[in-house]
């Protein structure tokens, strides 16, 4: 009867971990050239942007009820906390 010792289990575990890391390393080497291909095929942004139709500016009079005002305030507070810059509400619409 062959006994399987803790040392044998440790050696098998280390070997299995080494195989997994080796496969991950080979995979990273295979993926690395795609970065250069992606940069090669990027399209530069055009200097001209399509004109946007003029719309009337968003005003407090556009707020229909208290729920809409609360939603605008919560969204602006969250955006201010996330972006760490000043926030200007340009548009708000009610979704039904």
Image (cartoon, grey):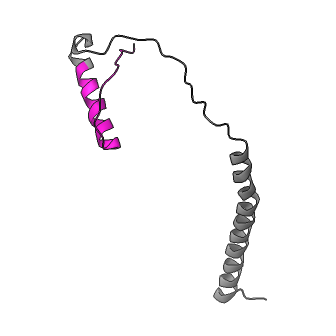
Horizontal arrangement in the rendering, residue 27 relative to residue 82 (left or right):
right
Q: 85 above or below 23?
A: above
**Which residue occupies the extreme front position in the image?**
47
Q: 76 above or below 18?
A: above
Q: Quadrant of the N terminus?
A: bottom right
At a point 35% along the width and 42% down the height, the residue shown is 83
Q: Quadrant of the C terminus?
A: top left
At a point 33% along the width and 22% down the height, the residue shown is 90
Horizontal arrangement in the rendering, residue 78 relative to residue 26 (left or right):
left
Residue 38 spot, x, y in % from top left: 70, 46
Q: Quadrant of residue 95?
A: top left
Question: Residue 10 or 60: which is nearer the viewer?
Answer: 60
Q: Quadrant of residue 87?
A: top left
Q: Is residue 92 magenta?
A: yes
At a point 68% along the width and 70% down the height, the residue shown is 21
Give the residues drawn in magenta, as a range: 69-96
Residue 25 spot, x, y in % from top left: 71, 67
Q: Quadrant of residue 72?
A: top left
Question: Residue 24 or 31: which is nearer the viewer?
Answer: 31
Q: Is residue 73 magenta?
A: yes
Q: How many marks?
A: 0
**Which residue occupies the extreme right position in the image?**
1
Residue 80 spot, x, y in % from top left: 29, 38
Residue 85 spot, x, y in % from top left: 30, 41
At a point 70% along the width and 61% down the height, the residue shown is 28
């Amino acid at each position: 009867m062959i006994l399987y010792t803790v040392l044998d289990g440790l050696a098998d575990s280390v070997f299995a971990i080494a195989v997994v890391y080796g496969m991950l390393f080979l995979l990273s080497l295979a993926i690395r050239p795609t970065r250069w291909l992606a940069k090669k095929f990027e399209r530069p942004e055009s200097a001209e942007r399509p004109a946007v139709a003029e719309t009337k500016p968003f005003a407090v009079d556009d707020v229909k009820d208290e729920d809409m005002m609360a939603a605008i305030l919560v969204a602006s507070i969250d955006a201010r906390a996330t972006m760490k810059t000043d926030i200007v509400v340009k548009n708000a619409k009610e979704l039904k």
